[in-house]
Amino acid sequence: MRVSNISVVGLGKLGLCLANVLAYKGFRVTGVDNDEKRIALLNKSKSPIYEPGLRSLLKSNRSRLQVTNDYAKAILNSDVTFVIVPTPSERSGYFSLDYVKQAMGDIGAVLKLKNSYHLVVLTSTVMPQSMDRYVRPILEEKSGKLCGRRFGLCYNPEFIALGDVVKGLLRPDFVLIGQSDEKAGKSLEEIQRRVCENNPPVERMNFVNAEIAKISVNSFVTMKMSFANSLAEICENVEGADANRITTAIGTDKRIGPSYLRGALGYGGPCFPRDNIAFASFAREVGVHANLAEATDDVNRRQVHRIFKILERENVKPPMKIGVLGLTYKPKTNVTEASQALQLAQSLASSGFEVLTYDPALKGDSLPIGGVKMAPSPESCISGSKVCIIATPWEIFGRIKATSYYDKIVIDCWRVLSEKSIDCASKYFAVGKGYSIIPAIAA
């Protein structure tokens, strides 16, 4: 099936990027969303979200991308529909299917009116068994058609990171496809082959294997990150130890690999924490103890406390002024969901410290926590504080004049500072290094 027209339901951070990447690759794309303000902005080629590379894509895709709130118009005039709606975490750790069910019901009602074959692709992350238990039955009931004959269904979650979504869509490490049948999987693979620029491996399998694979990837990656952070904490208590030197060495072993093996602050964001928790929750549901996933989460929740241990060791007490550089969970995004940097700033303020912060992706009126002041620049954040903590590794923080750190206690969670900056600090602490070597020049 040679596809020309594609619809994308849900134009959030991932959906909008996917719609634009598809249009960039020559498909005619119709985006569907129920947010009228978002639709109005997009029809003016203005991006409602912060994501590098997206604005230029919006401008270049004007002739191939249109946006509407009309399901019928979008689906009847396309061959394939990608669904990327929220699946928020529930208290149990499971992902809610409320938005998915609503979208599939609306799509199924339109498919009832369509005579030609249509492929439905769910990209939102869901719990294992969701496709067979809920998604397929809803589409069949609402359409009155049998999946695998009159329409196809695939599960195609993405493995991307905010700040690099466009690159991640164009050059993924691999493509994961859960398929209802051979025709559906083959059709989606052909689309992905046209989109991807690096000829990645494509793994096609049944729904439940793909669903488990999705949360398994992030559960494994977070386990690796928590191991690196545990190693860093050990090194912080051993004179002469340096976690970065150790992880660089052991990462050369093919059985381990260097990716995500770096001791710093813990992981955060909209995917890593919840996918790992979901993995453990699903394991318990089927009678298995996911000890590794649970330990991974436990280690991650303790990382902010490591910074407090440094402060206590240096007799830094409230109401001393502390500057926190970075609040987002990673660079190149304005997302603060489950951000360890944000949790650190919040914990410091709650403990009675005067907290001043700066983040290049956030403005003062959008500060996500109370009791914290936003500085107009990184330099003013540093100058207004006695202690400076670099909590998110934005490149801009490594380019600040070394003299800005003069006579400051600096805690560098990501090792972004130059030797000149380190020498200017009264005391410098690199996360993952033995703290018994205190003088800045020897750190």
Image (spheres, rainbow, N blue to C red):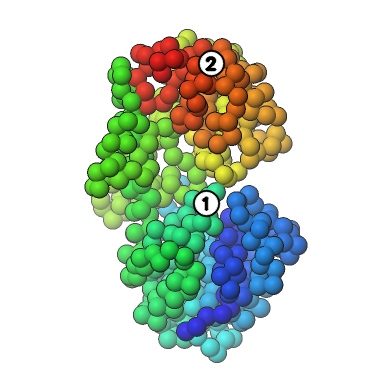
The answer to whether residue 378 is left or right of residue 108 is right
Pointer 2 local density, CA inside 10 Å: few below 14, some 14–19, many at least 20: many
Q: CA distance from mark 1 to mark 2?
A: 34 Å
Residue, far top: 315
Tell me the number on the disc at residue 424.
2
> Which residue is drawn at the image coordinates 57% and 21% (left, top)?
402
Percent of width and height locating residue 72: 64, 78
Which residue is the site of mark 1? 164
Residue 319 to residue 149: above or below: above
Q: Residue furthest front?
A: 420
Secondary structure of the residue carrying numbered label 2? helix
* Quarter where residue 337 is shown: top right
Look at the image and tell me whether residue 150 can be seen: yes
- Residue lying at the far bottom in this picture: please name it: 115
- Give the x, y percent position of residue 344: 51, 28
* Residue toward you, 173 or 284: 173
Secondary structure found at label 1 = loop
Q: Amino acid at mark 2?
A: Cys
Is the C terminus in the top left, top right, bottom left or bottom right quadrant? top left
Q: Which of the two residues, 177 or 287, is positioned nearer the viewer here?
A: 177
Q: Residue at x 67, y 65 (%)?
A: 60
